């Protein structure tokens, strides 16, 4: 689990928003469109007596940098405080260069957990090069439900907030660990909207502690899986090389109205780079957006497919793909992070997005998703697609920054085995 409950009070944190000016203009909506919109920053400003600026938006620099403090509580984490910041910059001619996005967040909790993370999605002039990467360092806790789909054991049986349960579950196995994760990918455009790239990834896990590891035959999932697959139980490393092919015709990163995104990643984990075992994975992602109205572009049908296939070799337990394994840890609304996982994993989601108010401050979504994972076991294997776990729900969107199309997202999702909860985030899930 790579993201924790520092987002629990993100909605409250908006009230303390601090904004700055970007270094350059972005490719944004026309001034006549922006003038009709009201975002959260303007609403907050009006509460403090600041009037909405009706001047020509082309003559001023929009605010593209935002910082949000937060605080929260979870039984596994304790009380936590943190801060998250996002920036939109343009490194080139804004007429032909996509806005680059930089994110950073950090939190600390009363139970000694800590996390620092940075992410970059940078486009050079005319989108010739695209650099994507992240750095994560921390000590955290994962709620462990085992491998595969189709098992009712360790079901949620309760309410969750932002992917974590609001109360302790005696059947769930907490898994504490420290980690360092570094990855960078560099893409070069080889045709219109098509990029080819390569990169490296380093994932190091230490001090892995199964809190329920007891007796001569431990039943903790990480311990049992690691013994069966020949991995150390308390630490392991998974480093490798990446080859990438990406197609991107989206009109915007944060909130697309149209276009398509395809990302294919071939990952080879190598022992000469420090991995405990060699392995080859293929990760494939597709995002497609259909505009449903020429009059109002916010009526959108969006589709998301995310998958990871183990082609050969073996993976350590904390590297198994599953719920919340995407870059922003938001895959699988309706379930806790890490609820399902497998050596191979597939996820699919369909979402309808629609406006609520004419000033675009409020909009909504309705979504449905499904996920499936495989498991190699000594007694019986679970094949990919053999068990499918559905989910769905509804959501509210609050326009946070109209210049960057940033939304505050609040979703209510449900799943199988009594799973249900509220999920909060900044910018669309996909």
Image (spheres, rainbow, N blue to C red):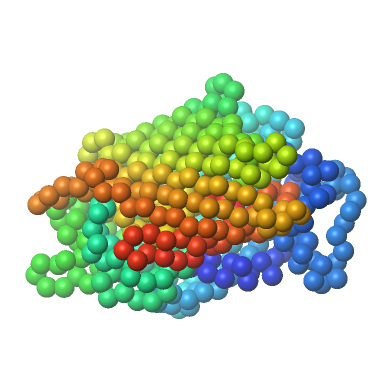
Q: Which residue is at the front of the view, 136 or 296?
A: 296
Q: Position of residue 174 (x, y in %)?
A: 30, 69
User: Is residue 410 visible in this depiction of the protein?
Assistant: yes
Where is residue 111 shown, x and y percent of the image?
41, 77
**Residue drawn at (22%, 39%), measured in percent from left and top?**
313
- Residue 85 figure quarter: bottom right
- Does 246 sit above or below residue 213? above
Q: 397 left or right of 419?
A: right
* Residue 123 in sight in this render: no
Residue at x 55%, y 73% (from the top left corner): 71
Image point 65% across, 62% down: which residue?
67
User: Which residue is most to the top?
Assistant: 191
**Residue farthest along the right direction in this orientation:** 55
For this rendering, which residue is in front, 387 or 28?
A: 387
**Point 38% across, 77% down: residue:** 167
Count of numbered circles in the view: 0
| Quadrant in which the N terminus appears | bottom left
Up-down relation of residue 288 to residue 16 (above or below): above
Q: Quadrant of residue 208?
A: bottom left
Q: Nearer the viewer, residue 79 or 53?
A: 53
Please state if 20 lies on the left or on the right of 329 as rendered: right
Left or right position of 407 against 276:
right
Q: Residue 297 in the image: x percent, y percent?
A: 68, 41
Q: Position of residue 382 (x, y in %)?
A: 20, 47
């Amino acid at each position: 689990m790579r993201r924790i409950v520092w987002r629990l009070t993100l909605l409250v944190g908006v009230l303390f928003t601090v904004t700055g000016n970007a270094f350059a203009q972005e490719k944004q909506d026309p001034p006549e469109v922006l003038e009709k919109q009201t975002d959260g920053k303007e609403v907050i400003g009006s509460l403090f007596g600041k009037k909405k600026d009706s001047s020509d938006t082309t003559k001023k620099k929009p605010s593209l940098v935002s910082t949000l403090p937060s605080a929260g509580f979870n039984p596994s984490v304790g009380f936590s405080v943190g801060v998250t910041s996002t920036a939109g910059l343009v490194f080139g001619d804004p007429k032909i260069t996509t806005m680059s996005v930089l994110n950073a967040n950090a939190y600390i909790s009363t139970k000694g957990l800590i996390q620092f993370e940075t992410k970059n999605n940078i486009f050079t002039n005319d989108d010739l090069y695209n650099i994507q990467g992240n750095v994560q360092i921390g000590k955290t806790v994962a709620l462990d439900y085992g491998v595969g789909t189709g098992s009712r054991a360790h079901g949620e049986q309760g309410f969750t907030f932002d992917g974590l349960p609001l109360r302790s579950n005696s059947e769930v196995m907490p898994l504490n660990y420290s980690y360092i994760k570094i990855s960078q990918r560099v893409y070069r455009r080889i045709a219109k909207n098509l990029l080819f790239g390569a990169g490296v990834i380093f994932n190091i896990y230490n001090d892995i502690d199964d809190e329920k590891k007891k007796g001569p035959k431990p039943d903790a999932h990480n311990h049992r899986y690691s013994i069966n697959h020949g991995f150390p139980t308390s630490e392991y490393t998974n480093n490798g090389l990446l080859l990438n092919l990406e197609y991107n015709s989206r009109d915007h990163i944060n909130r697309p109205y149209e276009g398509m995104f395809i990302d294919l990643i071939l990952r080879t984990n190598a022992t000469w780079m420090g991995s405990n075992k060699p392995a080859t994975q293929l990760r494939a992602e597709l995002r497609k957006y259909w505009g449903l109205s020429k009059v109002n572009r916010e009526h959108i049908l969006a589709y998301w497919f995310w998958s990871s296939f183990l082609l050969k070799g073996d993976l350590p337990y904390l590297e198994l793909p599953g719920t919340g394994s995407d870059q922003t840890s938001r895959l699988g609304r309706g379930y806790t992070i890490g609820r399902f996982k497998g050596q191979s994993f597939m996820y699919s989601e369909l979402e309808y997005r629609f406006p609520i108010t004419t000033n675009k401050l409020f909009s909504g979504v309705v979504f449905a998703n499904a996920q499936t994972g495989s498991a190699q076991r000594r007694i019986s294997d679970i094949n990919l697609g053999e068990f499918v776990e559905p989910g769905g729900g509804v959501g509210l969107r609050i326009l946070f920054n109209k210049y960057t199309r940033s939304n505050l997202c609040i979703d209510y999702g449900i799943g199988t085995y009594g799973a249900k909860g509220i999920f909060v985030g900044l910018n669309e899930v996909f």
